[in-house]
Image (spheres, rainbow, N blue to C red):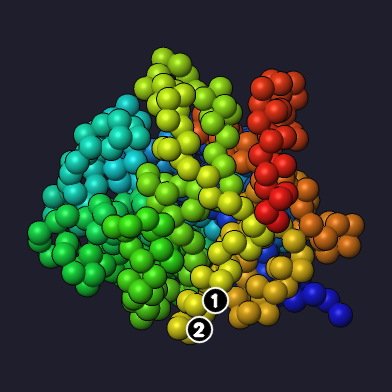
Amino acid sequence: MESKIFTPCKIGPVQLRNRTIRSAAFENMAYGNSPSRDLFDYHVAVARGGVGMTTVAYAAVSRSGLSFDGQLWMREEIVPELRKLTDAVHAEGAKASIQLGHCGNMTHRYTCGCTPVGASGGFNLYSPTFVRGLRKEEIYAIVEDFGKAVDLSRLAGFDCVEIHAGHGYLISQFLSPYTNHRRDEFGGSLQNRMRFMRMVIERVMREARDDMGVVVKVNMYDGFKGGMQREECLEVARELERLGVHALVLSAGFVSKAPMAVMRGAMPLKTLAHYMDPWKFWWLKAGLAIAGRKMIPTVPYRNAYLLEDAKVFRAHLSLPLIYVGGMVDRAQMEQVLDEGFIAFQMARALIRDTDFVNKLRSGEISCSGCGHSNYCIGRMYTLEMRCHSCVKNLPRKLEREVERAEAVTSSYV
């Protein structure tokens, strides 16, 4: 019998050929905030490699929402190139999704072109920069930006949109009491803190109409004291269910406070510092050298590391749920589907080998060769995301860092 992994499933109006989805892990391949040949080649290779759907990562709905120079910024002029990408993905038999979001305070003036904005004002130590709280009229304008981005996504040929409401980006900044200190109708109680998210999703659902899938990535917990915990996150998920979204991706963590809760393992600090521009990021390189492990502490990795938390959400919700987190082993993929998740997302296995799904289906392999050194993540902050196994002439100090990290990870898995 065919494994359930390779059976079709539906997300809203969109049918996938199987239950594997390339997650919206940031590629850093949109040079100048526009699609590139690298972005095209990567996602087409993933589609050719057998996935049900590939997700183009983290497209900003406005310039103020950009946090990287290599990040997509949704605007009319890039639609034709995105259409070429989606046409090529469809020709390989896969569906195409795009993640839409706004980074909020996780940026700098030289990237987003203005003083960074967030749910509330303050100082972002990781940029470092002062942050300004959004005025009400600006909040409404960003809601419209989300709607326009969905319309552009349709014109570009995407089957689904994934709205990023987790990980400490703007929607998450409104949801979390850690970053939302507002005293108006957008702050205070959870109902008030959900107001911005509710406005965004209602606008997105109107624009998606009846022919596009709408997926929302949401936290199950922020990962630190003072952030959102499970019960409030469950309430957020219930509200998204009430709003009629087609599926949720259940994640966790806050990139500015608990980044490794998202990815698990250790951040490869030598890799991170090695690729950074010493003039542009001198402050961050210095901080990493002095207190890197305190800034980004290790969170032990294991396969399917979010499953137990996700099962709690599965028990309390009726809408389709998509699992993400440590999906590298066929047996655990099948377990996830048996637990009632409609599909699962993965990234690192598909960064190492774009043909991973085809090899799983043929029986050539049953597990990815990814060793979870997180080299790809350390590199991603400066260059295009790539596995260390695909990089020629890797400096010896980075090879040693990879070897040590993989040895530690193998002791947990």
What's the amino acid at mark 2? Answer: Ala
Q: Quadrant of residue 121?
A: top left
Left or right of 70 in this view: 351 = right
| Residue at the left extreme, as displayed | 183
Q: Mark 1 = which residue?
A: 311
Left or right of 337 in this view: 79 = left
Q: Position of residue 26 (x, y in %)?
A: 53, 44
| Residue at the top extreme, as displayed | 279
Residue at x 22%, y 55% (from the top left corner): 180
What's the amino acid at mark 1? Answer: Lys
Element class at badge 1: helix
Q: In which quarter of the image is the N terminus?
A: bottom right
Residue 174: in sight, yes or no?
Answer: no
Q: Where is residue 344 in the image (x, y as percent from the top left)?
A: 62, 66
| Mark 1, other Cα within 10 Å: few <14 / some 14–19 / many ≥20 | some
Q: Position of residue 5 (x, y in %)?
A: 73, 71
Q: Mark 2 = which residue?
A: 315
Q: Is residue 42 above or below residue 142?
A: above
Q: Do the residues labelled 1 and 2 touch (CB within 8 Å)?
A: yes
Residue 248: in sight, yes or no?
Answer: yes
Residue at x 56%, y 64% (from the top left corner): 306
Identify which residue, 112 or 224, lies in the foreground. 224
Element class at badge 2: helix
Q: Where is residue 362 in the image (x, y as percent from the top left)?
A: 88, 62
Residue at x 66%, y 31% (from the top left corner): 401
Residue at x 49%, y 66% (from the top left corner): 250
